[in-house]
Amino acid sequence: MKLNIKWEIKINEAEYYIELIEMNLLGKATLSVNGEISKYAPTSQSGIGQWVLFNCGKQECLLKINPDKKSADIFINGISLNDNPRYEVLAGEETTSNNPFASVELHRKVRNGLSSFFSVIILSIVNIFMVLFNSPISFPFSIFSTTLVLGTGTALTEEFGGIIITAVCIGISIAIIAFYAALYYFSTKSTIATWIAFAFLLVDTAGLVFVGFLSQDFASIVIDIAFHAWILWSVIQLAIARKKLTDLTLSKIPTSIPTISSVEMLSPAE
């Protein structure tokens, strides 16, 4: 959803042009600060809206996206820029945070974690076609249970004939991937969903190790196990970073939030 909500502010003689460009289907906010575009996973607050903690130079800014998703406001040190569009921070005024760049690192970890999780889902889909076309290779950075189900279905089809078994196994594999895709979607919004995803990925990894022992060819899946360990680590880091970012963002919310008009905010020049 395109928004194009703009602000123009001045901090210690430096001009900042901020634009909330859009909110995508996954709920991520695209924000431009002096032409530098970044995507953020907002923190939701029931009945209030969504919040994004970001930086304007060395100053910490807090974006509030209203529930209608057609209007927004930015706060600096608890002051609304909708009410003070030319707000100027006095020389030497400090940000309210001991580390104004903490949110930058947390946003980076959240983006990296979500990217890794998304890659797992995409490569799992690719593996379905690889198994069906008898490819000698597959991507280990993926969901093992889908490959196991398809491999079992293909083997049974070769032994007993017919395509019903393969069709059923394809359906099960697609359902598994769809389940993880739903967890990915909710992980962009919720730490709980990320921990649920971690739990299922841990079971998936345990299944990989168990099959390796049963096949008595454990050495052949060492690489797969290493990649699954990487997946688990990425999801853990995502959950931890998401929780810290949520707590940090909520701690910056002004105790008194002014009523904001539902009319879309435009820059003073407009």
Image (cartoon, rainbow, N blue to C red):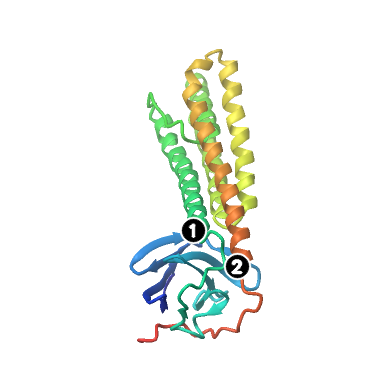
Identify residue type, mark 2: Lys
Identify residue type, mark 1: Phe
- Name the image quarter holding the N terminus: bottom left
Secondary element type, mark 2:
loop
Q: Which mark is residue 217?
A: none
The residue to which callout 2 is attached is 252
Farthest front residue in view: 92
Vertical placement of 223 versus 73: above or below? above
The quarter of the picture where residue 88 lies is bottom left
Q: Can residue 213 be seen in this snapshot?
A: yes
Instruction: Please tell me which residue lies in front, 119 or 93.
Output: 93
The quarter of the picture where residue 235 lies is top right
Farthest top residue in view: 216
Place of residue 167 in the rendered image (x, y in percent of width and height, measured from the top left): 50, 35
Place of residue 121 in the rendered image (x, y in percent of width and height, measured from the top left): 48, 43
The residue to which callout 1 is attached is 101
Secondary element type, mark 1:
loop
Which comes sooner in the sequence, label 1 or label 2? Answer: 1
Instruction: Please tell me which residue lies in front, 99 or 209.
Output: 99
Taking the spot 39% from the left edge, 68% from the top edge, the residue there is 33
Q: Are marks 1 and 2 in contact (CB under 8 Å)?
A: no
Vertical placement of 42 versus 143: above or below? below
Tell me the crowding category of disc 2: few under 14, some 14 to 19, or many 20 or more residues within 10 angstroms, Cα based: some
Vertical placement of 118 versus 96: above or below? above
- Name the image quarter holding the C terminus: bottom left
The quarter of the picture where residue 14 lies is bottom left
Residue 210 falls left or right of residue 157:
right
Place of residue 256 in the rendered image (x, y in percent of width and height, measured from the top left): 65, 79
Taking the spot 54% from the left edge, 50% from the top edge, the residue there is 184
Place of residue 26 in the rendered image (x, y in percent of width and height, measured from the top left): 50, 59
Instruction: Please tell me which residue lies in front, 108 or 71.
Output: 108
